Amino acid sequence: MKTQRPIISDDEHVVLKFRPRTSAHPPGGREETSQANASPAANDLSRYERPRDEGDDFRHRMLANVAALAFTVALTAIGIWLAVSIADLRKTQDCVLMGRRDCARISVTPQG
């Protein structure tokens, strides 16, 4: 089956002249003018502050920290287990691909 290509004529290839955009502000002075024209409400952070009379919920914060620590420890343990499992699988696979026959682990339980 033949692939069909569009017919391209020389009229479709046009070089466009690059004209930079003109702006009302010069490129070097944008920061100074934008901060000078900014409203004082935009720079006011008091709306994010908590009032002093509102107590800090220490117990809730500590429970959240313990939960985050437990999640991090669990995630780290899973990552280490996964890395060890992949390394063990790779060793076994390399052993089998070399043609050896004694690659499987033999677990011996003590008779007692």
Image (cartoon, rainbow, N blue to C red):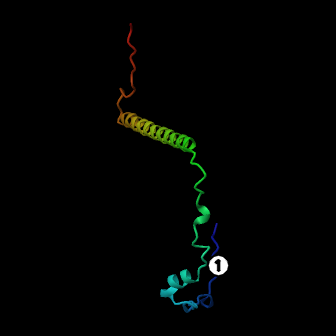
Q: Quadrant of the N terminus?
A: bottom right
User: Is 101 positioned to the left or the right of 59 in the image?
Assistant: left
Q: In this view, does 111 lie above or below 59?
A: above
Identify the residue under disc 1: 6
User: Is 109 positioned to the left or the right of 75 in the image?
Assistant: left
Picture quadrant where residue 105 is located: top left
The residue under the point 58% across, 91% down is 24
The residue under label 1 is which amino acid type? Pro
Where disc 1 sits, the SS reads loop
- Furthest residue in direction top, as rendered: 112
Q: In this view, does 92 lie above or below 31?
A: above
The residue under the point 47% across, 87% down is 28
Q: In which quarter of the image is the C terminus?
A: top left
Count the marks.
1
Circle 1 Cα neighbour tier, 10 Å, few/some/many (<14 / 14–19 / ≥20): few
Residue nearer the viewer, 108 or 39 = 39
Residue nearer the viewer, 92 or 71 = 71
Residue 106 in the image, given as x and y percentages of width and height: 39, 21
- Furthest residue in direction front, as rendered: 53
Residue 5 in the image, given as x and y percentages of width and height: 63, 76
